[in-house]
Image (spheres, grey):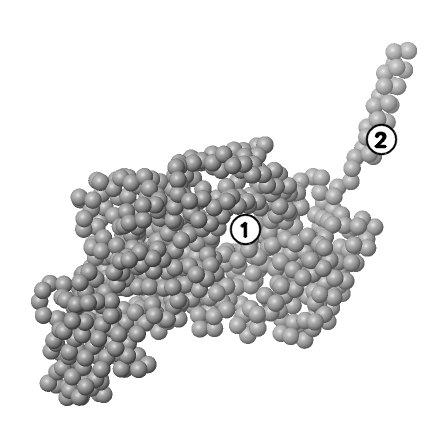
Amino acid sequence: MNKLKIYLSLLIAAFAFSTIFGQIQPEKIKVACVGNSVTFGYGIKNREINSYPAQLQKMLGGNYKVGNFGKSGATLLTKGHRPYIQQSEFQEALKFNPQIVVIHLGLNDTDPRDWPNYRDNFIKNYSALIDTFRNLPTNPQIWICKMTPIFSGHSRFKSGTRDWFWQIQEKIEVVAKGKTTKLIDLHTPLYSRPDLFADNLHPNFVGAKIIARTIYSEITGDFGGLKMPNVFSDNMVLQRGIPIPVFGTANRGKQVIIELDSTIKIVDADEHGNWNIDFPAKSIGEPFYLKVTNTDTTFFFQNIVMGDVWLCSGQSNMAFQFKQSARAKTEVPIANNSYIRFLNMKTAVWPKNESWPEADLQRINRLNYFEGKWEVCSPETAAGFSAVAYYFGQKLQKELDIPIGLIMNAVGGSPTEAWIDRKTLEFNPQLVDVFANWKKNDFVQDWCRERATINIKNASNPLQRHPFQPAYLFEAGILPIKNVSVKGVIWYQGESNAHNIEFHEKIFPTLVESWRNVWGEDLPFYFVQLSSINRPSWGHFRDSQRRLAEQISNCEMAVSSDLGHPTNVHPKQKKDVGERLALIALSNLYNENVQWQGPKVKQIAFNKNKVVVEYTFVESLKTNDGNPLRGFEVAGENEMFYPAQTKLNGNTIELWSDEVPNPKHVRYGWSAYTDANLINEAGLPASTYTTEFETKNEVIK
């Protein structure tokens, strides 16, 4: 009997203990997600489990309780068409008594009923909303969010939404600073993912997951541990002569130790998980190492050198491989040079005439289109690298005796607009429409549209992206290397924009502007003029390129019209092209005393029935084959051109035609495919040109 009493006593004690233990369990941390339809989960199937707050709950786990207090159509402005503070969701959020509040409002304030009228109240209204939550007994932490994107397909985008969106975005930053709240950037992770926004405003399930992951990291400080960008690897070249940036991500506040060539620096990851540190500038010297470590992870990179880093980009003539070039048989086997390094950003798939599998299509949407690591120049690594870039780097390395790093991310067939950042295109009133239904848009060359349609034929996502899509290659190929210091750019592209010269005249300077916004306004930009081929618009396009080179500062052009082929868009004489680009750099950037361009028109005099063209960058004009001059034509005011007879005299050419008694115009090498043969004593060719489009016919600059 006594044993039974003891047993019962133990049971009662165990029950009492478990009851008490249950009572002292800590309460769950409540997270109130306050916002509009994006928070609500509008358009997301099974939003109760797939909206961003629901996905955030799964990520945070059982110690948290996440509440969704989103209201579709809600405005932050209290005089807006649907003020959030007047909705039942607002009262429910207050009753929830959260310890954490995440606010994502502002999108609906871009409505013409709201921002134009009540913008002056935005900061006051947002501050009052924050204060209301702060006055709760729980004294919650407040995070406010930069808005998720509104894309250009939105019906009100050009009429005001685009401009008001960015004005509101700026005010949100002002509010965060003024009210000392934490700021979460929901815009950047989604701005390059239009494939996730079926209506240009509301993200789908995957977009909601990105939002949830971003907020999860900001709440917990978990940014995935120590990570380094792919641009860091063995054999890399770092830009000499300027502070050396080393950067990456880590969990919030975690210490990162960086050792560069025996110099050690320590930095803590900031509140958003980013860290970066600059080491003092170094000149060229012996190879060294970089070690990056924290308590969990170590990265070690070796055989690093200091030198000059060049970005080599464009379409297929830049991507054209060394092993395919005219001199490959003799020059590839001897391409051993440890002071030339390649970062060959190879593409996941090439835009051939084929349909891509779903796995590749999804990879493209995720912007995982390029991959590669730094490699030392050898016959094996050089063979598949850009021939133009190789010859460019080889000549620079030989003449300057410094390490040269070449980053190559050219994509065959790619149009200029694919390489420009989204915001620059969106804010240019002449270019924003390039986004509209781009696969049926005449701004984009028909070949590009047709090829893209074939490539993405099997896509399950109706918003499937493609490398030819406007802004795509900037987002996939430029943003990942934006923090890499570069000396300059060489560019070989235009074949996929030659159908619309006037559009290219707007978009090419925009490309240069876009990249200079990344790397600095003085970024040297050297490009290749298209060669010769029997494509009707190419004479006009080459002349347009010539004029663009004159209009854009620190931008020069290498002529290649003498190296073309009547039917092959990929001429094989790439050594001449690469070395002509190198001569431009040697003279204009490195101040070497070299002849760097062919004969250039200084002035034109029209004297009765003759024309005298004077050239600069030449002492004695010649022809590349020893034969008489070819390719010159003259015309009168009627602009009817006839072949001209010519006479060479030092640096001038005298032109006339019996068919043109009073010449007023001159053109040279104007045929799409031309055998024009004018060069200087250095063997460098003159650009093809026409005077028809010059402001003053008497002078061509």
Q: Nearer the viewer, residue 233 or 443?
A: 233
Report helix, strand or loop for mark 2.
helix
Across and down, in percent, residue 219 comes to 67, 46
Marks 1 and 2, the one that precedes in the sequence: 2
Question: Mark 2 highlights which residue?
Answer: 20
Q: How many marks?
A: 2
Circle 1 residues within 10 Å: few <14, some 14–19, many ≥20 = some
Tell me the element at label 1. helix
Amino acid on which disc 1 is placed: Val
Relative height, residue 108 to residue 312 (above, below): below
Q: Position of residue 378 (x, y in %)?
A: 28, 39
User: What residue does disc 1 label?
Assistant: 206
State left or right for residue 661 relative to residue 495: left
Amino acid carrying mark 2 in the image: Ile
- x%, y% of residue 648? 13, 73
At 38% from the left edge and 68% from the top edge, which residue is drawn?
Answer: 552
Q: Which quarter shows the C terminus? A: bottom left
Let me know if residue 358 appears in the view: no
Q: Residues within 10 Å of mark 2 (few under 14, many from 20)?
A: few
The front one of 701 and 16 is 701
